[in-house]
Amino acid sequence: MDAEERFNLIKRGTVEIVEETELREALKTKKDLSMYIGRAPTGPLHIGHIVALSKLLDFQKAGVKTKILIADVHAALDDLKAPWEALDARSEYTQRCIELALPWIKKPEFIRGSSYQLKREYVLDVLKLSTQTTIDRAMRAASEVTRMKNPKVSEMIYPIMQALDEQYLDVDIQLGGTDQRHILMYAREYLPLLGYRKRIEVMTPLIASLNGPGTKMSSSIPESHIKIYDSEEAIKRKIKNAYCPAGIVENNMILQIVRYVIFPATGRIKIERPEKYGGTIEFEDYNAFEEAFIQKKIHPDDIKGAVSSYLIETFKSARDYFAERRDWLEKLGKEFLPN
C-alpha cells in the first residue's frame, strides 16, 4: 500500500484533517507514525463511542500505531462526570469494553492518564501553558466538550492537558470528534509555545440518536443508544424502532452505523432479503450502498436486519463477558446495566 492509498484510508469517513498536506508528508517520510484517541471513563460505552473507535481500524490498516488514552483524570475534571473514587473501576470497565467491542487487527496500546499526568514534568508543563492561556481561550477550547453549566477551574485545565497529551503520548496524530475541534486547534496553536511540535488533527462526525432529529443520544435515555453488551432482543428492538425513513440520509443513525462501524471493520455489507424483493445483495463500496438507499432500491427494514445481525455478532464477546459480571455493573451505577 503506497502513501496515497494509506492517506485515502485514513481520510475516509472523516469530516476534517488539519492539515492534509502534513498527513501526506508524514506518510511519505515517517516509518513509525502513531496516533491516539482519548476516552474519558464517564459513563457506559455505547454505539456512539464505537463510531470514533472504529476509525482506529483504518489507521491500523494504514500501518499507523494506535494508542487509546483512558483519560481518567479528565473524567473528574469535567465537572465530576466521574467521581474521583470511581475512576479506577470505570477505567477498567472502559478498557475492557473497548477491547471486546471491535475486531482489532492488532490490540491498541492502552494508557491511563493518571500514569503520567500527575508527574512533576507534566504538571509543570500544565502550569506553564496556563500562564500563556487566557480564560476566554480556555473556555472557547473547552466549550463543546466539558459540561460548562457553572464553569469550574478544572474545566479550564481540561484543554491544556489534552493538548499536552499529544506530546507525552509521543504521537503524530490525534483523533477526535468534531465537538473537540476547538481543543485540537488549541493544541496546534499552544504546544509550540513550549517548544513542542504541532500534531495532525483528524476529526470524525458525531453520530445521531436512534430516535432521529431533535433528540440526543444519552446514557440516561436507553432507547437513544445501544450499549455494546445490550441483549440480542434489545439490539433488535432498538434498531427496528430507529429513525430510518426511506431515501433520507441526514440524521439517519442506521446509515451512520453502516458507514462508520461496519465498513471500516468488514469493507462490505450484505443484505439478505427474499427473492421476490430482489434477493440477497452485497455492497463493497459505501457510496454505492448509499446511492441505492437514496433511490429506494433497498428497504429500510432490510438494512435494519443487516445492521442488527452485525451488531449482535460483533458484540457477542462483550455480551457474554458482562453477563457474568452484572454485580460489577450494578456497582458502577444503574446506567451501566444492559437493556
Image (cartoon, rainbow, N blue to C red):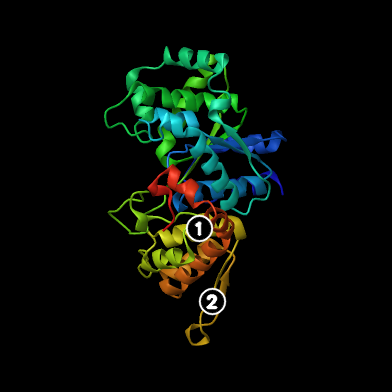
Q: Which residue is at 67% across, 50% downward? A: 105
The picture quadrant where one finds residue 31 is top right
Q: Residue 90: x, y in percent?
A: 49, 39
| As drawn, 156 above or below 49 | above
The one nearer the camera, 325 or 311, is 325
Tag 2: Cα neighbours inside 10 Å, few (<14), some, or many (≥20)?
A: some
Residue at figure coordinates x 33%, y 19% from the top left? 135
2 or 1: tag closer to the N-terminus: 1
Q: Secondary structure at mark 1?
A: helix
Check the image and report above or below for 158 versus 315: above
Depth check, front residue: 31 or 303: 303
Q: Quadrant of residue 119?
A: top right
Residue 222 x %, y % = 36, 55
Dividing the picture into quadrants, the one containing residue 122 is top right
- In the rendered image, residue 191, in percent from the top left (x then y), is placed at 52, 21
Q: Quadrant of the C terminus?
A: bottom left
Q: Residue furthest bottom?
A: 276
Which residue was labeled with disc 2? 272
Q: Is residue 246 above or below residue 273?
A: above
Image-based side of 233 in relation to 9, left or right = left
Query: Where's residue 253, x and y in %?
Result: 41, 58
Q: Are marks 2 and 1 in contact (CB under 8 Å)?
A: no
Q: Amino acid at mark 1?
A: Arg
Count neighbours of disc 1 (C-alpha within 10 A) and say few if under 14, some if 14 to 19, many if 20 or more.
Answer: many
Residue 259: mark: 1
* Residue type (three-letter) at the residue carrying disc 2: Glu
- At 47% from the left and 36% from the top, the residue drawn is 40
Q: Nearer the viewer, residue 220 or 244?
A: 220
Q: CA distance from mark 2 to mark 1?
A: 18 Å
Query: Residue at horizontal 61%, vertical 49%?
Result: 57
